[in-house]
Image (cartoon, helix red, strand yellow):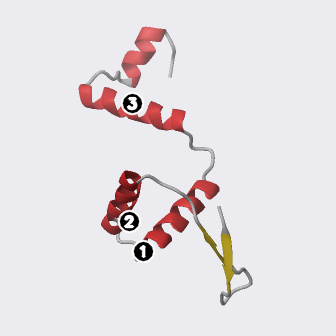
Amino acid sequence: MSGVTTESDGEDSIVTVNFKLTESFLDEIDDTWQGRGFNSRSEFIRYTLRDAIEHPTFDRDELVALLDAEADIREGTTMSSEGARDRFGTDE
């Protein structure tokens, strides 16, 4: 990675960062930022990185659990809270 510093209006200077991606991944990024109304690829990448820094507790395991739960809901394999209480013998 290399960095080139340029001037900015604020206290922080703007730094250019270079990194490598596959062309297919870059195509996905371009489809995503354009489809979500961002003005540029850079704006989308900055937003995405800032979001990852501000919300670091959400990890891949949690995403997998959410996707599994969504699949259960769509397949109708979930249980009501009343059914769970009856099955596991707990009270409200």
Residue positioned 42% across, 74% down in the render: 40
Q: Which residue is mark 1?
A: 40
Tell me which corner region of the image, top left, top right, bottom left or bottom right, holds residue 18: bottom right
Residue positioned 50% across, 64% down in the render: 45
Query: What amino acid is at disc 3?
Result: Ala
Going from N to C along the chain, the mark reached first, 1 or 2, is 2
Task: Answer with left or right where residue 8 lies relative to residue 43.
Answer: right
SS class of the residue under badge 3? helix
Judged from this view, the residue extending furthest toward the bottom is 9
Q: At which x and y percent is residue 63?
A: 47, 38
Going from N to C along the chain, the mark reached first, 3 or 2, is 2
Tag 2: Cα neighbours inside 10 Å, few (<14), some, or many (≥20)? some
Mark drawn on residue 69: 3
Q: At which x and y percent is residue 68?
A: 39, 29
Check contact, mark 1 vs mark 2: CB within 8 A.
yes
Tag 1: Cα neighbours inside 10 Å, few (<14), some, or many (≥20)? few
Query: What amino acid is at disc 2?
Result: Trp
Residue positioned 33% across, 68% down in the render: 34
Residue positioned 59% across, 62% down in the render: 50
Residue 38 or residue 78, whichever sits in front: 38
SS class of the residue under badge 1? loop
Tell me which corner region of the image, top left, top right, bottom left or bottom right, holds residue 36: bottom left
Task: Answer with left or right where residue 45 lies relative to residue 9.
Answer: left
Tell me which corner region of the image, top left, top right, bottom left or bottom right, holds residue 32: bottom left
Q: At which x and y percent is residue 89?
A: 49, 9
How far apart are the two marked residues, 3 and 2, measured between alpha carbons? 28 Å
Q: Quadrant of the N terminus?
A: bottom right
Judged from this view, the residue extending furthest toward the left is 75
Query: What amino acid is at disc 1?
Result: Ser
Q: Which residue is mark 2?
A: 33
Vertical comparison of 64 with 31: above or below: above
